[in-house]
Image (cartoon, helix red, strand yellow):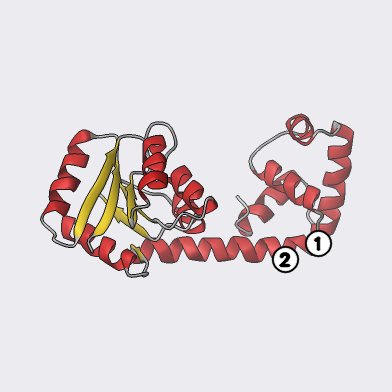
Amino acid sequence: MPIRLVLADDHPLILDGLENLFKLEDDLQVAARCTDGDQALQAVRRLKPDIVILDILMPGQDGLAVARQIRAEKLPTRVVLLTAAINEDQLLEAIRSGVQGIVLKEMAPKLLVQCVRKVHAGEQWIERNSARQALEKMLKREAATDEISRLLTAREIEIVRMVAKGLRNKEIAEKSGISEGTVKVHLHNIYEKLNVDGRMALLHFAQSKGLV
């Protein structure tokens, strides 16, 4: 049986190119083509294809949101992202969302065909250097979170992240539903526990631990 595909991209020329590419392969069959994330998710739910090929940037739900929903609903379809560019945070999110393949649009079309076949066989296809960097960053963050969670409470960690994003005490108070005075108490406790001497030192600490 051929590998059944759903294609999703908001550019008709890309969709035409993909469909024509897969028509040349006897073992690949396009079951549906979609122009936004909502259509793609509906098609995956209805058709249960082997693989859905998603652009990251689409109207409605983007490709990562569709991937997360496919995973949340435990649908059998495997996900391949086809994108013009992807940054480290998006790559991390893709890996966490269960994406099995990532192909850049600048790569040769035959690599996308290879990717589809490998992903269908249960393998992962992600550009090596990007994947290595992203996984190192993810492991560093998780190790830092484990280390800090032994020193700080969940609320204190949340406040550290907000400080690292540049939020002032008033903004932190509003987002956390607490008073500015309580934020100051938390910060005082955080400074003592982490042995840092102020906001800038806390920011440098958070950056060194990969928390931002």
Kind of residue at disc 1: Leu
The percent coordinates of residue 75 (x first, y second) are: 46, 54
Report the residue marked by disc 1: 151
The percent coordinates of residue 56 (x first, y second) are: 38, 43
Identify which residue, 99 or 209, lies in the foreground.
Answer: 99
Q: Secondary structure at mark 1?
A: loop
Query: Is residue 119 visible in this depiction of the protein?
Result: yes
Q: Secondary structure at mark 2?
A: helix
The percent coordinates of residue 85 (x first, y second) are: 33, 47
Res. 147 mark: 2
Kind of residue at disc 2: Glu
The percent coordinates of residue 163 (x first, y second) are: 70, 42
Identify which residue, 116 or 32, lies in the foreground.
Answer: 32
Q: Residue at x 60, y 57 (%)?
A: 210
Q: Residue at x 54, y 51 (%)?
A: 72
Identify which residue, 130 or 102, lies in the foreground.
Answer: 102
For label 1, the crowd category at 10 Å Cα-Cα, with few meaning under 14, some 14 to 19 and many 20 or more, is: some
Q: Residue at x 42, y 46 (%)?
A: 45
